[in-house]
Image (spheres, rainbow, N blue to C red):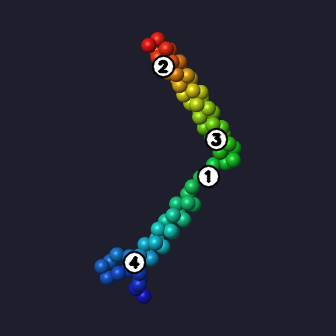
Amino acid sequence: MANTNIKKDGKPGFFARITHSFRAVKSEMKKVVWPTKKQVLNNTLVVLAFVGVCGVFIWGLDSIIHLATNTLFNLL
């Protein structure tokens, strides 16, 4: 019995392509290695610490620029 999902021009039909895509996604999802809870917690803490350090750095630069502009405008 011939495959009825293949058109005369040799290309698979719309629903055959959709089915193939879902099967490919399912196959790829089986290959995913999910992190453990400990890894997720560790990575979250690293990100929060980095964001905190960047926030303090930006606050420091903002304070220095604010002080410099206030000093400059007060001299004028």
Query: Counting residues from the N terminus, which is met first, the one under dot 1 or under dot 4?
Result: 4
Q: Which mark is residue 13?
A: 4
Per the image, the residue denoted by label 2 is: 69
How far is mark 1 from mark 4, CA to CA?
34 Å
Q: State which mark lies toward you, 3 or 1.
A: 3
How far is mark 1 from mark 2, CA to CA?
50 Å
Tag 3 and tag 2, C-beta contact below 8 Å: no
Query: Counting residues from the N terminus, which is met first, the one under dot 4 or under dot 2?
Result: 4
- Kindly tell me whether residue 57 is visible in this rendering: no
How far is mark 4 from mark 2, CA to CA?
67 Å
How far is mark 3 from mark 1, CA to CA?
15 Å
Q: Is residue 56 above or below residue 20?
A: above
What's the residue type where badge 2 is placed? Answer: Thr
Q: Secondary structure at mark 3?
A: helix
Q: Secondary structure at mark 1?
A: loop
Per the image, the residue denoted by label 3 is: 44
Identify which residue is drawn at 38% across, 76% down. Answer: 12
